[in-house]
Amino acid sequence: MKLRTALLALTVGAAACGSDPSGASEMPGDAEAPDSSPPSRAPDAGAAEDSSPPSPVVAVAHERELRGAWISTVYNGTWPSKTGLTKEAAQAELLALFDALAGAHMNAVFLQVRPESDAFYASTLEPWSRFLTGTQGQSPGWDPLAFAVEQAHVRGLELHAWLNPYRGLASGATMPAANHPTKMLPDRAYPYGTQVWMDPGAPEVRAHIRDVVRDIAMRYDVDGIHFDDYFYPYPVAGATFPDDVTYDAYVAGGGALPVADWRRANVDTLVREVHDLLADVRPDIRFGISPFGIHRPGTPPGIVGLDAYAVLYCDAPRWMHEGWVDYLAPQLYWPTTRTAQAYGKLVTWWSDLAEDGRSIVIGHDLTKLGQEEWPVTELALQVELARVERPKGARGNIFFTAAALRDDRLGIRTALASKFWKTRVTSPPLARAREAEISPPITTVEGKELVVSTAGARVRGFGVYRHEAGAFRLTDFVAPAASDPSRSSARIALGAGTWAVSVVDRRGVESGGARVVVP
């Protein structure tokens, strides 16, 4: 049916969006690093003024949650399946992952772009990852992160750049490239077990990590920066982490903290500095960390396991309380049937940490799927228990890894999608933008399609609501059109009825709904 022209152009938000912070077009054939000079600061996503008469606007909202999956690259764990793939083969594998997740109405991917102080993108700071070509420092001839950002966005997926901050080399037997941090900062690179670790107590190491984060955030249109649980390394039997020189220098300079507190302070400093950096250069993106799932033995009562506070020197509750992270994604990799690591107790304890609009997003392990304690119903129960904690701030789930969802292993993707993800949704708004307001989209009718747009602002997408049973209910969340380089418009086919269409900006702020009547 033809759409009735029920809407004219709407007044849209006041803050005009500046230039694309990504530089995210695919690199040329030799994939040399582009000019790393920062572009203009990435703005909060608003829109320019339009003087046309406004159309009717209605209040709309939907239950937000992040639905994500980790794509590991270290040792070719999830992607690429092996080193030396052609550009076409590697891209096809990545798109198969994206298509499976988007088809299940998930909305985020966490792509490991820095597995061992290296790069899955064109960088002047660190060498190309060996997990692309087999040789560290060898260009694959294309830019995987640029391609991933573009292709994730056209499928309605957020792309979060997952970095391992302090792991220097995943294997000490690796021949590092000349510009690898273990070569550039050799006095701060420590063999530990079978790996090489960069010293978290060295200011020059932290400064380098900040430079890497800034480089990614300013040159690529990523939706987030993500750290996992590797800060100080997991303990190796019979080995002591060799940071005596750094600690002794700290004491000689007047420092008074015991070594354990000093190590925690080093990690805290990096987390705070990365938060402050991103708040300055990319206030529209999310910063989060996925800590080990047990903070301390006995917390909550009855829980037994590794002490992340005392062994990994991670104080995740403090990061949340200080507002240094937008979310925590605790790795709750135990089944509900365990007593010593009871999932139910842990999900409640972690959810209690959410405050001031920041979120807890639960991490789940799919690698054990099919083992005795891990039927598909166990994962469904875990998601259900996480949703019970929504009132406290539990706002979604991330799964390790995306491979099981791509393959629909034992029907896991089908089960989760049919039970929990029947409709596309968008992730929660950034806490710092909760009180922000933006105006609804501009709407025009072209044939049987509704064209929605903002005045040049890059947006996350458009919420489509249908009026039924006396209320507007979300039926879909539509990504900007792939053909629109500004990522500010979409075409939506609507059936007969009363509808409302909202816009969600890059911070996750949603407008009111522009009301549309289709006869």
Image (tube, rainbow, N blue to C red):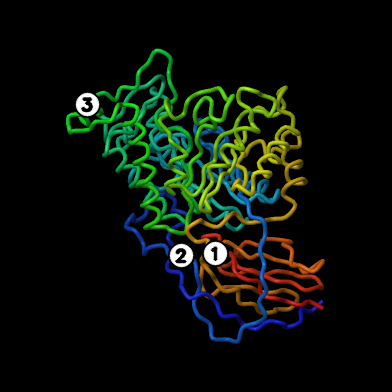
Q: What element carries label 3?
A: helix
Q: Nearer the viewer, mark 3 or mark 2?
A: 3
Which quadrant is the C terminus positioned in?
A: bottom right
* Kind of residue at badge 1: Asp
Q: Nearer the viewer, mark 1 or mark 3?
A: 3
Question: 375 or 478, which is in the foreground?
Answer: 375
**Residue in the picture at 62% in, 46% down:** 396
Measure the C-alpha gap from mark 1 to mark 3: 48 Å
**Residue in the picture at 76% in, 34% down:** 377
* Kind of residue at badge 3: Asp
Residue, far top: 238
Q: Residue 505 carries which label?
A: 1
Examine the rendering and report whether any part of residue 57 can be seen. Answer: yes
**Horizontal side of residue 430 vs 128, given as left or right:** right
Q: Is mark 1 on a helix, strand or loop?
A: strand
Disc 1 to disc 2: CB gap under 8 Å: yes
Disc 3 to disc 2: CB gap under 8 Å: no
Q: Name the residue under label 2.
A: 44
Instruction: Tell me if residue 114 comes above or below residue 48 in the rendering.
Output: above
Q: Which mark is residue 248?
A: 3
Measure the C-alpha gap from mark 1 to mark 2: 8 Å
**Residue in the picture at 71% in, 24% down:** 373
Residue 180 in picture, x, y percent from top left: 33, 36
Residue 95 in picture, x, y percent from top left: 61, 47
**Horizontal side of residue 256 vs 47, given as left or right:** left
Measure the C-alpha gap from mark 3 to mark 2: 44 Å
Examine the rendering and report whether any part of residue 401 can be seen. Answer: no
Which quadrant is the N terminus positioned in?
A: bottom right
First in residue order: circle 1 vs circle 3: 3
